[in-house]
Image (cartoon, grey):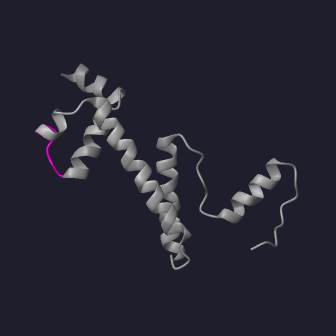
Amino acid sequence: MKERAQYNLEHGLVWLKRWWVKKYNLPPVHELFVGQSVAELELEFFEDLWAQREEVMHQLEDEDTRSAERSVMYRQLSVINNVLGLETESSDPLVDQWEKDLAEGRVPDLEAR
């Protein structure tokens, strides 16, 4: 059993199971879980991540979102992007622009807002 548990952890099945249980508040022995293939569960997991990413992006575009909330959202976005294999973003788009300018050999506009 220890070897099987280690195998499941190394191949991502443990995290997939934990995500599903948390999302649906059902045990991992439930027929809705065991009745799906790993590929179907992974597809649902990634669809869920893409939907979460879109929601966070829309919230970040909302000018009424407070600074403290933005910081949390950028951390969420960073985690989601990392799992999806996308480039992560900092919590400050201005700093991102400065870093981009520097990487491209330009002097960043430090007075920009």
Q: Residue at x 70, y 58 (%)?
A: 96
Q: Residue at x 35, y 38 (%)?
A: 43
In the visual, does 12 lie left or right of 112? left
**Image quadrant where residue 11 sits:** top left
Q: Position of residue 89 (x, y in %)?
A: 60, 54
**Image quadrant where residue 46 sits:** top left
Against 75, is 34 above or below?
Answer: above
Against 93, is 43 above or below?
Answer: above
In the visual, does 100 lie left or right of 29? right
Q: Position of residue 42 (x, y in %)?
A: 34, 36
Q: Position of residue 92 (x, y in %)?
A: 64, 64
Q: Residue at x 15, y 48 (%)?
A: 26
In the visual, does 60 lie left or right of 36? right
Q: Quadrant of the C terminus?
A: bottom right
Q: Main secondary structure of the magenta part?
A: loop
Q: Which residue range is magenta in the image?
A: 25-30
Q: Residue furthest bottom?
A: 64
Seen from the viewer's position, the closer of residues 99 and 26 is: 26
Q: Quadrant of the N terminus?
A: top left
Q: Is residue 29 magenta?
A: yes
Q: Is residue 24 magenta?
A: no
Q: How many marks?
A: 0
Q: Position of residue 5 (x, y in %)?
A: 24, 26
Against 87, is 54 above or below?
Answer: below
